[in-house]
Image (cartoon, rainbow, N blue to C red):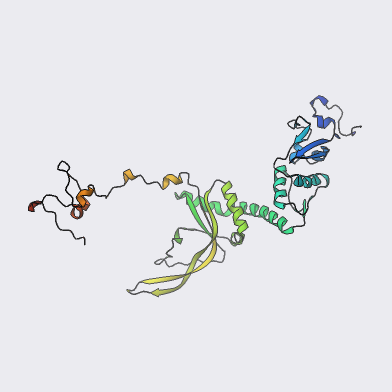
Amino acid sequence: MSARPDFQPEGRDEKNMSPLSRLPHERVTLMVDGTHFVVDPTLFTAHPDTMLGRMFGPARHFTRPNTKGEYEIAEGIGASIFRVVLEFYKGGILQCPEGVSVSELREACDYLCINFDYSTVRCRDLSALLHELSNDGAKRQFEAFLEELVVPVMVSSAQEGERECHIVVLTDDDIVDWDHDNPPPMGEEYSQILYSTKLYRFFKYIENRDVAKALLKERGLKNIRIGIEGYPTCKEKVKRRPGGRSEVIYNYVQRPFIQLSWEKEEGKSRHVDFQCVRSKSVPNLMASLGEPTRPSVTPTPQVDELDRLWISPDPRPHSQAPPTNDS
């Protein structure tokens, strides 16, 4: 078998070339999920940006066969999925047949560094394909939202010494008008407000919220919650209560929220050091119950509980305990 005229340029040192480079038409045996595939490695080298293209390329030497001369590759990828992958190397299209999971094919493409989009994938289950493409688009979109909108709000909270943040996403047309004397009773005044109709629409889908949560977790944030909650925007009416007290009824709208934390010592922040807490317990339980105590023991009650707790065991009139007001 003769080599191609353009395969080995004149003056190239054969000693520094891999065996696959010296024999461009040599077929190799791949072992994937217990199944043998006999292929021409030049199929892979035609796509040098993929993992298999780099493994069998002329500049790589780390690809070694086993004792049987087989190349064990693509661990975790099923044989049916790999057959679809080989079709991509032959014709540039991933034709996903019925019975093959689109999500598994997507994971295989990510592992093998193969571009997964509508230009390279054909699938009868259009819903599954669009779901994967939407996940890609949602990740790219939220990465932009995160840098442009969310991170500045988090930085503002961090500069005030906070280590967690609760962000409510309102639309561009929402108006917040609270009564300063009667704010909402739920603590909404501590929430950060972010006006963005685009981000509001993004969080409308639970799948997008899952993508955003996964991305925030990748960025090292903790205690992440993303959902929909009621948020008070403006006064709806004011009720007068007996005694002249006013009660403001607010109009609530359903809006997305993001809650997250970057606290490093979250467990220690909620730890109570009981050595620093002043005890108000009874120093002598028997004395509090009116039982006689040992003569050698002189109970020393706390000052703030002297009038209520101390009952002397001595029956003499001058040492009688003062009457208490407890019923």
Q: Is residue 196 left or right of residue 298?
A: right
Residue at 76% x, 35% y: name it: 71
How many marks can you see? 0
Q: Residue at x 31, y 47 (%)?
A: 277
Q: Position of residue 111 (x, y in %)?
A: 70, 43
Q: Is residue 88 above or below residue 123?
A: above
Position of the C terminus by quadrant: bottom left
Nearer to me, 230 or 87? 87
Seen as rendered, the residue at the extreme left is 317
Residue 170 in the figure: left or right of residue 58: left
Position of the N terminus by quadrant: top right
Q: Is residue 176 above or below residue 49?
A: below
Q: Quadrant of residue 133?
A: bottom right
Q: Nearer the viewer, residue 62 or 232?
A: 62
Residue 286 placement, left or right of 20: left
Q: Position of residue 247 (x, y in %)?
A: 40, 71
| Residue extending farthest top | 15
